[in-house]
Image (tube, rainbow, N blue to C red):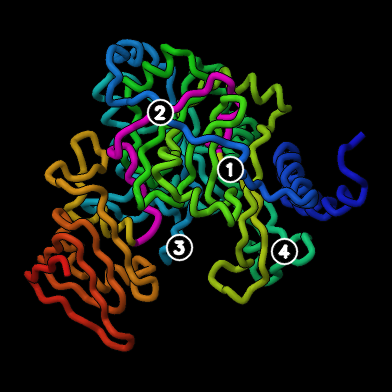
Amino acid sequence: MSEYPGDMLNSFRPFEEKMRGAGMHPLAITMFKRNYLQLLSGSTGSISRSQIEPVENVPDAEELSGFADEGMSALPHAVIIKLNGGLGTSMGLEQAKSLIPVKDGLRFIDVIAQQTLHLRTHFGTHVPLLLMNSFNTHDDSIDALTAWPELATELPPDFLQHRIPKVLVDDLTPAEAPDQPELEWCPPGHGDLYTAMVTSGLLEELLARGIRYAFVSNADNLGAVLDTEILGYFAKHGFPFMMEVADRTPADRKGGHLALLTDGRFTLREHAQCPKDEMDEFQDITLFRFFNTNNLWINLEALKQTLDRYDGILPLPLIRNSKTLDPRDPESPEVFQLETAMGAAISLFETASALRVPRTRFAPVKTTDDLLGIWSDAYVLTDDFRIVQNPSRTLPTIDVVLDRQHYKFISQLEEHFPHGAPSLLDCASLHIEGDAVFGKNVVCRGNVRIRVPDGETRSIPDNNVLEST
C-alpha cells in the first residue's frame, strides 16, 4: 500500500505521462515522483538550526603525508567525472558553459583535457575522464572533445543526466510552453549523478572494469584535479564517501556548508534549504566554518551497495527552487524546480569523511565577476593546468562585484574590457557601479570602487592606476 493518498498519486499522473512520453527511464520517473510527492506533502527541504550542529574541525589535506604510494596503487582503479550539464545562460550564452574561454585563450574543456593528459603522462596511468552532460550540453561538448582524440578510452566520453518537468507554483501541475516546449523541462540538480550512473549502465561498467574510486567535481572548478595523496588517504582509510571542504570567507557565505546531524553523521545544508529567519546565522562564517567545494570522492562499490539498499534512488533531501518558466522573462509563470545536491549523500554513509583543502582546489566561475578575476593576473595557469591564485599575490581571494546591468553577460564584459582584464594582483576588491570602459594596462590596487552616474559612461585611460578610495 502506498504511503501517499490517492489524490496525491492522481496529481502525479500527468507528470508520469509526460515523462513516459518523452522516453524517460522508469527509475528517473520514480525519482521525480518521490520529490514531487514530498512537495505535495508540504516539504520544503528546509534544515533548521535545531537539527544540526556546526563542525569544529576536520582533517587537513595540507597535513597529509605518506599516502602517495597508496594513491599510486589506487590510480589504475580511479575515474575522473566532471559535471558538465550547465549552459552559460546566466552569462548570456546558449551553449555549454565549459566552452567559455577562461584563461590564456583556453576554454574550460581544454583545460580539463590537458589536466587529464598531464596526469596520465606524469603517472603513466590511463585514468579515464567522463563528462556528465545534460541534453543541452552533450552535442557541443562531445564536438569540443574531438580536439583531444588522445583522451579516448574504452569507456564512452560522457553519460547524460536526466531532465524533469517544471512544476507550476500556482496549482502544482506540469508547466506548459507550447511555443517553446524546451522551457517545460529542467535539470534535477547534480544529485541526479547517482541515478544517472545507474540508468546509463555506467556504474556497472566501471565496477566490471575494476574501477572503484571516482573523483567528481564541477567542470567550472579548474582547481579540482585528481590528487594522488588525497586519493591514497581516501583509499587507505576505506571511506565510502569523502567531501572536500574549504574555509568559508565572506565571498562564500551563501554557499552550502558542512554540518553535523544529531546522530553525529555529516550533512550538507544548501542556501535554498535554510529557513529565511535563520539566514543571518547560515551566513555566519565563524559558526559554520566549512563550505562544500563540490569536489567529492566516492567508493563505487559502497555506492552500489547503498543504491541497492534504496532500490536505485538515494533519498537525498529535496531542494525546492523557485524560478520563472522562462528564465529570461521575469513576467512568465512562477515554477518550482525540484532538485537534489550530490553532496547531500554524505549523510547516507555512516563512515563518510570530510577533508579540509586549500583554496587552490577551488577556483569556480559562476558569474562574470568570477570570470574577470580568473582572466586577470590574480590567477595563473600552472604547469599541471590548474588555475590557482597567483603565488605573488599576498591578499585573500579577490572580491569582484560588477554592475549587473552593464556586466552580466560575457559580451558586455568584453565590451567594457576590450583589452582584457586590468591587473588585479594587488587588488583586494573591485566594485563597479555603472558604465565604465577600461583601457589598456590598467592597474587596480587595494579596494577600488568605481561609481558612474546613470546615463553616463566613464572611460578609464590606458596605463591608469586605480587605488583605494
Q: Which residue is mark 4?
A: 169
Q: Look at the numbered disc 3 and give the secondary structure of its residue.
A: helix
- Per the rendering, the mark at residue 90 is 3
Task: Tell me the SS state at disc 2.
Answer: loop
Q: Earlier in the sequence, mark 2 or mark 4?
A: 2
Distance in Å between CA atoms under marks 2 and 4:
40 Å
Within the image, what quadrant is residue 193 found in? Answer: top right
Task: Give the CA separation, mark 2 to mark 1.
Answer: 19 Å
The picture places residue 41, in percent across and down from the top left corner, at 79, 49
| Residue underneath mark 2 | 57
Quadrant into which the C terminus falls: bottom left
Disc 2 and disc 3: Cα gap in Å? 35 Å
Say whether disc 2 or disc 3 marks the residue closer to the N-terminus.
Answer: 2
Q: Residues within 10 Å of mark 1 (few under 14, many from 20)?
A: some
Q: Amino acid at mark 4?
A: Val
Mark 3 vs mark 4: in front: 4
Task: Provide residue 133's location: percent of width, then percent of height.
Answer: 51, 44
Q: Quadrant of residue 69?
A: top left
Who's the residue at 85% across and 51% down the image?
A: 13
Q: CA distance from mark 3 to mark 1?
A: 31 Å
Percent of width and height locating residue 226? 35, 28
Which amino acid type is marked by label 3?
Ser
